[in-house]
Amino acid sequence: MDISCTHCKSSFVLPDDRIPESKKFKLNCPKCRELIIVDQEIENDKIVAPEHFPHDATVAFLFVQNKDLANRISLFLKQRGIFVSDSSLVHEALDKVRINYYNILILEESEKSKSILAIVKKWNGMRRRDVNIILVETNCQSLHANEAFFRGVNSVVGAQDNQRIENVLDLALGEFKSYIEPWNIAAKKLHLKG
């Protein structure tokens, strides 16, 4: 179960085997130690419907709190024919990432996005390989391969490059295209022989 603290706004995952059987329970936030009251009846009422996009469309999901930056990224993607879905609420973002298939995830580096990356870590290798995950507003150099690897994403975009986000995203998308191309060729050869 994904839980967000109303006090410090951090998000964390409570393993299913640790969830009490009662509909309402209390726990302390692991970060700020404040009391959190969880009402499962209210939580279960918030259902995110699956999104529908054209067959074979490239779809990106954005979880970026900086509205100006999110708008610029969205416009950049739409100009390239990429459909865009977004959310500014972490619980809605978690649900969307769980139930929809996205080709691109663009997440802001924050405590909230860590819970989304936790979902990604549970994906099998085939699914993870097919999704280009880009972390923006990082505190490192843009497109630094080691920093991306340590964060569990394909590319990172430093906060210092927000003014030229379109250029850096173009490079990040190009890098992923080069990375995925041999996998796609191998898959086609397997389908032809199989």
Image: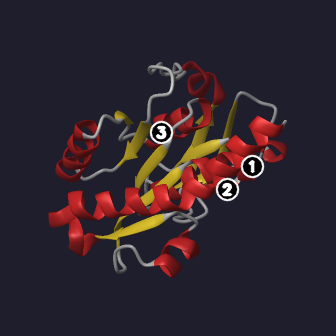
Quarter of the picture containing the C terminus is top right
Asked if residue 133 shows in the view, the reply is yes
For disc 3, the neighbor class at 10 Å (few under 14, some 14 to 19, many from 20) is many
- The residue labelled by disc 1 is 124
Q: Name the foreground residue: 169 vs 91.
A: 169
Quarter of the picture containing the N terminus is top right
Give percent across and percent down for residue 68: 17, 50
Q: Check disc 2 and give the amino acid type.
A: Lys
- The residue labelled by disc 2 is 121
Mark 2 / mark 3, whichever is N-terminal: 3
Q: Name the foreground residue: 172 vs 1.
A: 172
- The residue labelled by disc 3 is 93
Q: State left or right for residue 133 relative to residue 162.
A: right
Q: Name the foreground residue: 54 vs 106.
A: 54
Q: Residue at x 37, y 80 (%)?
A: 140
Q: State left or right for residue 159 relative to residue 5.
A: left
* Label 2 secondary element: helix
Disc number lying in front (3 or 1): 1
Disc number lying in front (2 or 3): 2
Q: Residue at x 35, y 77 (%)?
A: 139
- Distance from disc 3 to disc 1, alpha carbons, whole Å, reads 20 Å
